[in-house]
Image: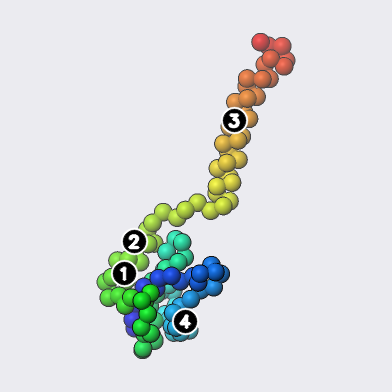
Amino acid sequence: MKSLHIKKLVDSSGGNFDYKGLDIDLFVTNTQVYFNNHTEILVKTIEEVIPEHEDITILTEQQYADWADEIKNQPKPPTEIELLENRIAEQDKVIEELMFEIVPSLIGGE
């Protein structure tokens, strides 16, 4: 089994994954570790002959383990839903503050 780092995983059009001639059917299940931007991957494979390619680096087991741990422990960027929820919460707070300013004058309190 070999541990690999593959760079430039997504082709230049941004839509297709390019595994640089590797047979993805020979990837070891649950060993793929994608970088946050999904343009690089760490993976283990049982493929015997690794194609020579400038975007493929063969790693030691320790390098793979250390790097995989580092990637897995990075904080994940907020999802689109989380960003929208935060924005709504901020807007709700502003609306509430405005209500406390405006409502008393509307009911003749100030």
Residue 71 position by quadrant: bottom left
On screen, 70 above or below 44?
Answer: above
Give the camera-side residue of 4 and 8: 8
Q: Tell me how far mark 2 sits from mark 3, CA to CA.
A: 39 Å
Query: Disc 2 vs disc 4: Cβ atoms closer than 8 Å?
Result: no
Instruction: List the single residue furthest toward the right.
Output: 107
| Residue tagged 4 | 24
Hey, what amino acid is under mark 4? Ile
Q: Tell me how far mark 2 sits from mark 1, CA to CA.
A: 9 Å
Q: Tell me how far mark 2 sits from mark 4, CA to CA.
A: 24 Å
Q: Tell me how far mark 1 sits from mark 4, CA to CA.
A: 20 Å
Hey, what amino acid is under mark 2? Glu
Query: In terms of secondary structure, where does tag 3 sit?
Result: helix
| Residue tagged 2 | 70
Query: In terms of secondary structure, where does tag 2 sit?
Result: helix
| Residue tagged 1 | 65
Of mark 2 and mark 1, the one earlier in the sequence is: 1
On screen, 97 above or below 90?
Answer: above
Of mark 1 and mark 4, the one earlier in the sequence is: 4
Residue 53 position by quadrant: bottom left
Query: In terms of secondary structure, where does tag 1 sit?
Result: helix
